[in-house]
Amino acid sequence: MQGNVHHADASTFTTTTDKSQVYETAISSAVALFESQRFWATNLANTASLMWHAFDALGMHVNWAGFYVVQLRRWQKHSDADTEGDKELEGDKRGGKRTLMLGPFMGKVACQTINFGHGVCGTAAEAGRTIVVPDVEKFPGHIACDGSTKSEVVVPILDDAGAVRGVLDVDCLVLNGFDETDVQFLESLAGLIGRSCEWDL
Ligand code: SME
């Protein structure tokens, strides 16, 4: 990202069915962008763009690609998926309850907060492992931010110390929207993000 190269060019992918070509380009672009930037919001925003345009170039039917980030909160409105209203959470800010807050994304407006252990995102964050959901209707507790989503993959983002700092979430309009190559790409991106950002949340 130097000299005469426009940043927007990093989001230009040639339309193809060659996933390795598109994903290698996206990873290279992320590496180049993160070399000069460690602010989490900036890096997640550009990564959401890279994912969105990469999936579009591959003709995949991705309808949402983005992030939720972990925040420690004493007070919070209950998760969008809950109906119990506001409640006080145990602990102070330092020892407070962890909540996933909507971060940078591409796609339609989405649920703003998700509690750990709730939905695909909260389950992946709590377990600290990738969850691939071939059919969202078969995932108990799936949070339907968009009723047209059919499949989903969520990858936790870990910092250098191994703490979960957020999740990468991608939704698709077709069943079984993601294969092993897609998941490997997303896990590579999540790993790169975890190592490349300051998590001052
Ligand atoms: N479906 C997710 C909620 C986030 S949206 O997909 C953007 C879940 O069950 O956690």
Image (spheres, grey):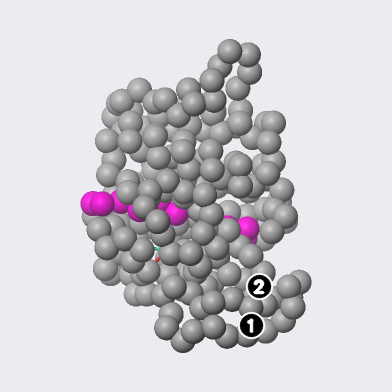
Instruction: Please tell me whether residue 167 is drawn above or below residue 31 in the rendered image.
Output: below
Question: Quarter-wise, where is residue 157 in the image?
Answer: bottom right
Which stretch did the figure color magenta?
164-174
Residue type at mark 2? Answer: Arg
Q: Quadrant of the N terminus?
A: top right
| Contact (Cβ within 8 Å) of mark 2 with mark 1 | yes
Residue type at mark 1? Answer: Leu
For mark 2, give the secondary structure: strand
Say whether residue 167 is magenta.
yes
Give 75 or 153, whichever is nearer the viewer: 75
Say whether residue 197 is magenta.
no
Instruction: Please tell me whether residue 96 is drawn above or below residue 201 in the rendered image.
Output: below
Asked if residue 183 can be seen in this view, the reply is: no
Q: Quadrant of the C terminus?
A: bottom right
Q: Residue at 64%, 47% (x, y): give it.
A: 40
Asked if residue 96 can be seen in this view, the reply is: yes
For disc 1, the marked residue is 89
Give 154 or 69, whichever is nearer the viewer: 69
Q: Residue at 35%, 23% (x, y): give it.
A: 14
Q: Residue at 48%, 64% (x, y): give it.
A: 112
For disc 2, the marked residue is 73
Q: Position of residue 52 (x, y in %)?
A: 40, 40
Q: Image quadrant of ligand 1?
A: bottom left
Query: Counting other residues with Cα less than 10 Å from the Cα at mark 2, is it few (<14), some (14-19), or many (20 or more)?
Result: some
Q: Determine whether, in the image, residue 194 is placed left or right of residue 55.
A: right
Q: Determine whether, in the image, residue 65 is placed left or right of residue 191.
A: left
For mark 1, give the secondary structure: loop
Q: Position of residue 74 (x, y in %)?
A: 67, 77
Q: Position of residue 140 (x, y in %)?
A: 34, 74
